[in-house]
Amino acid sequence: MSASLVLVFAVLLMIAVLVSERAHRTVLSTAVLFLLGGFVLGGGVLGVLHIGPGDPIVGGLAELALFSVLFTDGMRAGVSDLRRAWRLPGRALLLGLPITLVLTALLAHFVAGLPWLESFLLGAVLAPTDPVFAAAIVGREEVPARLRHLLNVESGLNDGIALPIVLVLLALTGGTDAHGWQLAEELGLGIVVGILVPYGVLLLERLPFLQATRSLQPLLAVSIGLLVLAICYATHANLFLAAFTAGVTVATAGRGLRHEFEQFGELITELIKLAAIMVFGALITPAFLFGEIPLAGWIFAVLAIVAARPAALFVSFLGSKLGRREQLAAMWFGPKGFASVVYGLIVLESGIGLADQVFHLIALVIVLSILAHSSTDVLIARQFDDRHVPTKQ
């Protein structure tokens, strides 16, 4: 890892922390700061960061970041949690996500001209959402609690749901060495590792002579994650599916451990996420956006944002009791975030024939989504604040 990369990350992190209070009340977000920082300091503008698609740090950081994010997402998704509040998030996940995937794939094929397999791969990469880029919606008390809960649960689970689809489609397009039964074996082994390892550690922790002190409790969850990661590397189990499954297992069987891990673990995950977003921004150049993407690509990107998810969520909420304003906000706020960033980097590193073209479209949609959603979240959140609306006499 180069000194310039560490220096840039440290400076951006310092700035992000110092302006975080003001950013919380405006259209600026920490993730946007790192994306723009990577873009401006990358090779296409100032040239401070020299990062190319083939650099080992790109694939390694993307892999580590996705593992960390999926493990943390799984921690928020204990089985009992899902039973208590499944109705609206279930509509968004079980109907909205696959419809979004299919509509995006249709746009990719008929507008951008991609073959069918690559179109569906693109749809799977862009289907997950991330409320980090619409923080004012999920972080403001004036926004109805059920809308905030809907977007939080949906974004926390759709990364893991989309993951197997991305992996299977990537294998079908020749992006991995595993095919057929070998791929199924890797995915199944990932689930087994994600269940057995946390359960084994939690059973040990319950023995009277092996209890951890309260101050070190958060490190127990970290050790579970690292152990799952190491076993996956040794056995060739799918580490992403293992990460999500392990998080769900810890949330279900070790609720106290989940609480202890929450703040500490999320800070670690946030650091890795921001580093990956910065690297992603450094890979995007003005020539990348305006010289290498044809007009059809731009039309596809705009339609993927303003048509695919809104149409999918409209169908998903038919017959629900969600209010009109809440429905419109949920339909609009489906920002393409961190999971799509990392899935895009994995596609780029996969070596499939159309990897560059698919990555260009992924990157364009993510950039436009971040700009559109991060610049409108505060404005729309204020529409739910009825304190200043005059009442009728």
Image (spheres, rainbow, N blue to C red):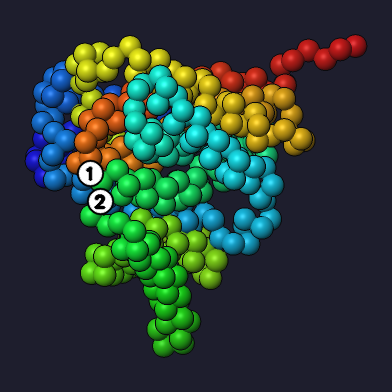
Q: Position of residue 34 (x, y in %)?
A: 30, 31
User: Which residue is found at the position 43% from the left and 57% from the top?
Assistant: 244
Q: Are marks 2 and 1 in contact (CB under 8 Å)?
A: yes
Q: The residue under label 2 is which amino acid type?
A: Thr
User: Which residue is found at the position 74% from the left and 15% from the top?
Assistant: 389
Q: The residue under label 1 is which amino acid type?
A: Ser
- Is 383 in front, or is 361? 361
Q: Which residue is mark 1?
A: 350
**On the rendered structure, is 184 left or right of 85?**
left
Q: Position of residue 39 (x, y in %)?
A: 23, 24
66 shown above or below 30: below
168 shown above or below 111: below
**On the rendered structure, is 190 left or right of 14?**
right
Q: Quadrant of residue 366?
A: top left
User: Which residue is found at the position 44% from the left and 18% from the top?
Assistant: 302
Badge 1 crowding class, 10 Å Cα cut-off, few under 14, some 14 to 19, many 20 or more, is: some
358 shown above or below 290: below
**On the rendered structure, is 208 left or right of 367?**
right
Residue 134 visible in the displayed image? no
The answer to which of marks 2 and 1 sits earlier in the sequence is 2
Q: Secondary structure at mark 1?
A: helix
Which residue is situated farthest in the right direction here? 393
Q: Which residue is mark 2?
A: 176
User: What is the quadrant of the C terminus in the image?
Assistant: top right
Q: How far apart are the two marked residues, 2 and 1, measured between alpha carbons?
A: 7 Å
